[in-house]
Image (tube, rainbow, N blue to C red):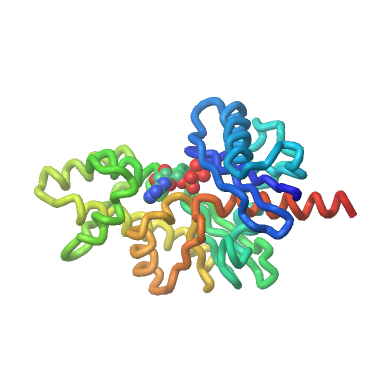
Amino acid sequence: MNCFAGIDIGSTAIKVALIDDAEQVLASFLYPTGSQFKRNAEEALTRALEKAGVGSDNLAFSVSTGYGRRIFKNSDHTISEISANAAGASHPDFGAEGVRTVINIGGQDTKIIRLDDMGCVSNFRMNDKCAAGTGRFLDMAAHTLEVDVEELAGLHERAQGDVLAINSTCTVYAESEVISLLADGHQAPEIAAGIHHSIAKRIVNLTRSTGIEETILFDGGPALNAGMVDALEISFSRKIHVAALPQFTTALGAALIAKEEWLEEEA
Ligand code: ADP
């Protein structure tokens, strides 16, 4: 059996996906990025292989991607996260059939990727200048509300009344705004929902230049947050599909590209 690895070195987490010749997932493994990208990426790959019960001699080809990919020298090839994300999103099991728009929210940036009917990238837009629409913004909100980021969805579900406006364009000011809302007597559910809607509004603005077309797939760690999915569906007035393993779509795409490149080399 051959094993193909996709290693996504993101700003907050390293994601490793291992697939076999039949594109079945052998293992997915997440490890904090930390400050030692190279060492931590090596560790993540070793642990993923252990989890899959696969020896390193079965590792036929590996492709690294993401923010820290240039520092990790041990993969056979590197590709941009846009290409890797598009490959994962277009796969019927890892993404969705007929995806035309990918909304990816990462730890430090947000991307809109438009795909043509062949699944090739036709346009993209990235916001990495401001943390206000990213996972870091959600982490700040969770920290200020004294909950784990996994609990934001439950709070969102309990929100009542009109959506609270969170207008700050910068995480630092948004943190003060959340503290002021708490001081004014607003409750955590309404604030969590307000945060989700403010991020969704930013994403709508980001799609002004790319356009948006169904099928729409949402991936990246914040796609695990059902409150964020709800806010996007309301803002776009459309169904938003969530990837099967949303934090791993880019790593899975890199693993698919690893398989393709290995087949080309073998031919
Ligand atoms: P990157 O690739 O930049 O490291 P990720 O796609 O891994 O980013 O997303 C990281 C973000 O995902 C975190 O900042 C956090 O806000 C969010 N996140 C991670 N796990 C969860 C979870 N279980 N529920 C909700 N949000 C999550």
Inspect this view and state whether residue 82 appears. no
Q: Quadrant of the C terminus?
A: bottom right
Q: Is residue 87 above or below residue 211?
A: above
Q: Give the residue displayed 51% in from the left and 61% down from the top.
A: 243
Q: Is residue 143 above or below residue 17?
A: above
Judging depth in this view, the residue of 6 and 141 nearest the camera is 6
Percent position of residue 145, x then y: 22, 43
Percent position of residue 220, x then y: 49, 52
Picture quarter containing residue 70? top right
Q: Give the residue displayed 26% in from the left and 56% down from the top.
A: 154
Relative to residue 176, is residue 81 drawn left or right?
A: right
Judging depth in this view, the residue of 67 and 16 nearest the camera is 16
Relative to residue 181, is residue 192 drawn left or right?
A: right
Specify the farthest residue to the left.
Answer: 185
Picture quarter containing residue 69? top right
Percent position of residue 146, x then y: 23, 40
Q: Give the residue displayed 34% in from the left and 69% down from the top.
A: 234
